Amino acid sequence: MNYKYKIYKRFSNSKYLNLHNFKNSVNILARILAFDYGEKRTGIAVTDEFQIIASGLTTVDTKKIFSFLTEYLKNETVELFIVGEPKQMNNTASESEHLIKVFVEKLSTTFPKIAIKRIDERFTSKMAFQSMIDSGLKKKHRQNKALVDEISATLILQSYLHKQ
């Protein structure tokens, strides 16, 4: 068996499959978005199309998150949303969990074709701040809460990717 046949055999009954049909038969270029949801701001991180690398995307005013996502999804294919799940040290839900549940419910009704998973987000803000210190950012830049939220979302997404 030649190499191409081995790859394409999985996706088609025919021996030959053109690239157009291959691309349409499997959604191999879908991203994952992760959210560090907050009352004022929401940090967003994204994977590359092959879901290998997590990168910070942006921080959005929480009131504008759904308009941002609607625009973003016009240009990008996303197959999964990861939402941080804030827990306390004793593994109980934090005070902000009720707000995040409302966000998750609205996310699932607004974008019903995109799956949603929750990931423990304990210490992500502290780890984000520490990574800013470790990278040598000046104090002025470390006080940028939007950047902390974006890095926190990236850490949430990296945590999910490592568990896969």
Image (spheres, helix red, strand yellow):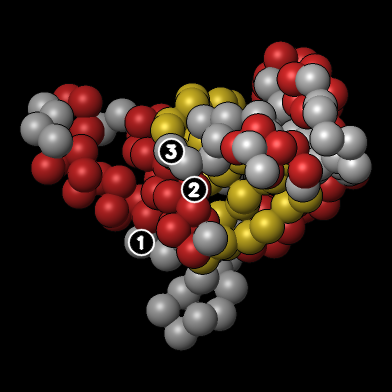
| Circles 3 and 1 in contact, beta carbons < 8 Å | no
Q: Nearer the viewer, residue 40 or 19?
A: 19
Of the image marks 2 and 1, the number of the one nearer the N terminus: 1
User: Residue 74 placed where, x, y %?
Assistant: 77, 16
Q: Tell me what residue is drawn at x 61 percent, y 51 percent.
A: 83
Of the image marks 3 and 1, the number of the one nearer the N terminus: 3
Q: Tell me what residue is drawn at x 9 percent, y 32 percent.
A: 136
Taking the image as drawn, is residue 5 in sight? yes
Q: What residue type is labelled 2?
A: Leu
The mark found on residue 53 in the picture is 3
Picture layout, residue 163 above or below residue 105: below
| Other residues around mark 1 within 10 Å, as few (<14) / some (14–19) / many (≥20) | some
Picture layout, residue 77 above or below residue 88: above
The mark found on residue 54 in the picture is none
Q: Which of 154 and 16 is in front in this view?
A: 16
User: Residue 40 placed where, x, y %?
Assistant: 55, 36
User: Residue 114 placed where, x, y %?
Assistant: 80, 42
Q: How far apart are marks 3 and 1 (CA)?
A: 21 Å
Taking the image as drawn, is residue 44 in sight? no
Residue matched to label 1:
123
Q: Classify residue 14 by image quadrant.
A: top right
Q: What element carries label 1?
A: loop
Instruction: Give the mark toward the camera: 3 or 1.
Output: 3
Q: Distance between the residues labelled 2 and 1?
A: 14 Å
Q: Residue furthest front?
A: 1
| Other residues around mark 3 within 10 Å, as few (<14) / some (14–19) / many (≥20) | few
Residue matched to label 2:
157
Q: What residue type is labelled 3?
A: Ile
